[in-house]
Image: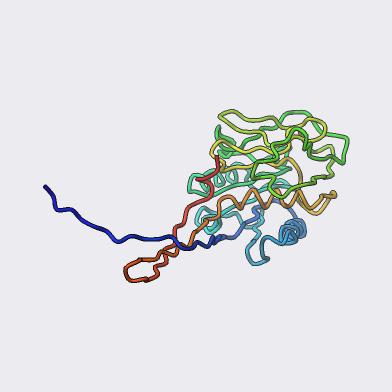
Amino acid sequence: MFPRKTFPAFLLTAFVPVVLSKPILIYHADSYSGAENLKANLVATGLIGLSEIDTIDERYSPADLPTLSQYDCVISYTDLVPNDSIAMGDLLKDFVDAGGRVTIMTYSYSSPWDLKGAINDLGYNPFEATANRMYNFPRELDFSSADTEHFLLDGVTEFTYGGNSNYYEVILSGSGASLVASDDYGVPLIAINEAKTVTGINLFPGNVFSKSPGVYRTIYNSCTVSSKSCLILTLTVPASNALTHIAVCVSLSSLII
């Protein structure tokens, strides 16, 4: 018989949640002012600092995987034709495969500004474009049919936006993509892939067309789920009354059901 071992009893006396946020990269084919406008509106949510968001224009400074890997989340959109939309899409897929998160926005779903490449493989981009142009703006998110308990809509109570006829309607892609919300015309607006690593938001985030604060809160939400959340546990050993602090960190994306 093996000798019986005894272990000291530990009491969990306190825990403190800590969010270790990594920066966001806006990887775009847009004007400098357009990308900076998106950055400023994300900061205006009060949930992220200016120094936590960078911008790179794909047309002049094509990124590589080591560059993207410095970030937790990449927001990708176009207003101008990308320098190489296939390479851009391939890179975003590689980034997702390496553990990152991607948010894709208009005009990435509109020709000739559309995002091509491997990010459109099954299981990644939750949307695919149709040939149907969109009219009748402004529009708003239809909260009556939306999954308002979804993390993408956390803290979102209003969501209105403008647009033009260069918006194309989208449909869900295959392989388990989930629709989170449609607009007030019944057109899909927000979706996420099954792995919860790629979000699609079918509106233009740049510095034209009016957009309410809820739009930017949703964009922010699409990136924050991948932040690492840590619990700082305070354990007390009764015999010595000594305190021990242990940090337990997990990726929030692994906890989303």
Q: Residue at x 49, y 63 (%)?
A: 14
Towards the viewer: 218 or 204: 218
Q: Is residue 6 above or below residue 166?
A: below
User: Residue 103, relative to residue 186: is it above or below?
Assistant: below
Q: Residue at x 52, y 56 (%)?
A: 229
Picture quadrant where residue 21 is located: bottom right
Number of dots carrying numbers: 0
Residue 31, x across and y down, in percent:
75, 56
| Residue 236 vertical placement versus 123 (above, below) | below
State which quadrant residue 167 falls in: top right
Q: Residue at x 74, y 56 (%)?
A: 38
| Residue at the image position 48 percent from the left and 48 percent from the top | 98
101 and 68: which is toward the camera: 101
Which quadrant holds residue 241?
bottom left
Name the spot of residue 193 as percent of width and height, x first. Answer: 59, 37
Q: Which quadrant of the rendered structure holds the C terminus?
A: top right
- Is 88 left, or right, of 111 in this rendering? left
What colour scheme was applied to this rendering of the protein?
rainbow
Q: Is residue 128 left or right of residue 41?
A: left
Residue 164: horizontal and vertical position, in percent?
84, 40
List x then y, in percent, for residue 127: 66, 34
In the image, farthest residue toward the front: 239
Is 56 or 126 nearer to us in this picture? 126
